[in-house]
Amino acid sequence: MIRDDRFVVREAKEEDTKAILNLIIELAAYEKMENLVTATEEILKDSLFHQGAAKTLIAEFEGRPIGYAIYFFNFSTFNGKAGIYLEDIYVKPEFRGMGYGKDLLGTVAGEAVKRGCPRMEWSCLNWNKPSITFYESLGAKHLDEWRTYRLTGEDIRKLAEE
């Protein structure tokens, strides 16, 4: 963990919602997907802080948000235990390569250990070589045999009605 009094990772609070949304938009821009962001402050407040749909961590440097992680618990029927799915992890470009991302991810890993989770999982875009290199340096393994599927909008409604 980083030994720098200027850096802290903490649980997000409702008043962090605007900062979280801004960081989500920055991540979407980096991934060339800003047109897919439909989240608003109101939606995030409701989902994260009222419904408790996911846990959010804020990474701060000198009191300023420089990154975040959003994760939730999934379940492995094979293990019979909950695991952690890391939906997002993001650190502003000017703070990369300094250990802040590793500390942020390590905080999520600490939660997994505390709760006895047998695994943590996340997705990474195929073209994102810097992130792939970072994750593999930590011992993360790419699962070639699995393919991600997604239903959205009208396809969800259509399936639900059948």
Image (spheres, rainbow, N blue to C red):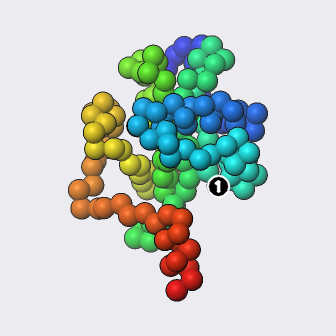
Given the current orientation, which residue lies at the most extreme left position? 144
Q: Position of residue 132 (x, y in %)?
A: 29, 37
Q: In the shown orientation, is residue 33 left or right of residue 13?
A: left
Q: Position of residue 86 (x, y in %)?
A: 48, 47
User: Residue drawn at (38%, 49%), measured in percent from left and top?
Assistant: 123
Foreground: 105 or 149?
A: 149
Instruction: Give amino acid for label 1.
Output: Ala
**Residue 114 visible in image:** no
User: Residue drawn at (50%, 46%), measured in percent from left and top?
Assistant: 36
Q: Position of residue 17 (x, y in %)?
A: 70, 36
Q: In the shown orientation, is residue 120 left or right of residue 132?
A: right
Foreground: 108 or 18?
A: 18
User: Residue drawn at (62%, 46%), measured in percent from left and top?
Assistant: 39
Q: Where is 121 relative to 12, above or below? A: below
Q: Position of residue 80 (x, y in %)?
A: 47, 69
Residue at image mark 1: 53
